[in-house]
Amino acid sequence: MRKLALGAAVALALSFGASFTHAADSDKKISGVLIDDHCVTKFMSKDDPQKAAEAHPAACALKCAKDGKLVLLHGKDQIQLDKHGQELAMAYLSKPDASTKVTITGEKSGDEFKVASIEKTEETK
């Protein structure tokens, strides 16, 4: 019985260690198109919604987001930004050189992405 209890305790300790390691590695970067939740619906029926939305102007996303929210369009997925992410996205889109092609850094939390930063995606050719 003691061996069973000891084995369970070791397994539990190892699982906690793994979860702490995983939590430290949970910040990740995702690239896509920063777009308002009104205009994103126009692009969702396309074969490649992200590619189709790349020409969407930052000024339109900023204007339309005042009555809605901003999302990150990544492939065919709409990634919901947390409240802080919404604030960062509005500030980012207010810049004169803003592009809707961005990379966000943060972590997934439930249905939302907890955004730590938003930056312009570097163009590659």
Image (spheres, helix red, strand yellow):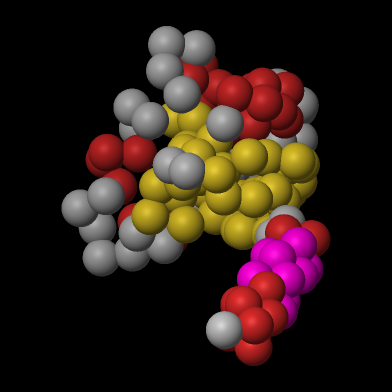
Give the quadrant of the C terminus.
bottom right
Question: Which residue sits at x=57%, y=84%?
Answer: 1
Depicted 12 relative to depicted 63: above or below: below
Question: Which residue sits at x=42%, y=11%?
Answer: 67
Residue 102 percent location from the top left of the image: 65, 49
Residue 49 figure quarter: bottom left
The rendered magenta stretch, by its main secondary structure, is classed as helix
- 82 or 77, which lies in front? 82
The answer to whether residue 79 is magenta is no
Q: Does residue 30 show up?
A: yes
Residue that lies at the very extreme toward the top in this rendered image: 67
Q: Which residues are magenta?
A: 10-22
Question: Which residue sits at x=70%, y=65%?
Answer: 16
Residue 94 percent location from the top left of the image: 70, 22
Residue 12 percent location from the top left of the image: 65, 71
Question: Which residue sits at x=61%, y=58%?
Answer: 31
Depicted 21 relative to depicted 5: above or below: above
